[in-house]
Amino acid sequence: MAEMKVQVNLTMRAVGNQISNQAYSVSSKFKIPEPKAFNGNRDAKELESFIFDMG
């Protein structure tokens, strides 16, 4: 039973390391564009574009 706990702990550590490494490598590959600043115009299309770029 103790050996099984050791095996489970080692497996969990290995999986945890893989997930954290994958999250770092994925985030470093993609460049997320920043939305353009809203310039204060009361144009509905401009506001819609700003809100769409935020999401």
Image (cartoon, rainbow, N blue to C red):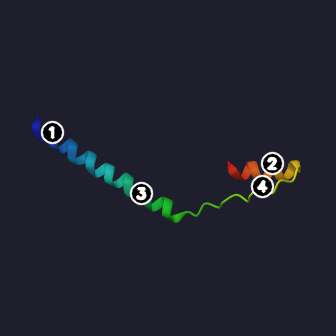
Which residue corresponds to mark 2?
48
Q: CA distance from mark 3 to mark 1?
A: 27 Å
Whole-percent x and y of residue 9? 21, 43
Which residue corresponds to mark 3?
22
Q: Quadrant of the N terminus?
A: top left
Name the amino acid, label 1. Met
Q: Earlier in the sequence, mark 1 or mark 2?
A: 1
Whole-percent x and y of residue 38? 77, 55
Q: CA distance from mark 2 to mark 4?
A: 10 Å
31 vs 12: above or below: below
Q: Residues within 10 Å of mark 1 (few under 14, many from 20)?
A: few
Q: Earlier in the sequence, mark 3 or mark 1?
A: 1
Which residue corresponds to mark 4?
38
Q: Earlier in the sequence, mark 2 or mark 4?
A: 4
Q: Callout 4: helix, strand or loop? A: loop
Q: Are marks 3 and 2 in contact (CB under 8 Å)?
A: no
Q: CA distance from mark 3 to mark 4?
A: 35 Å
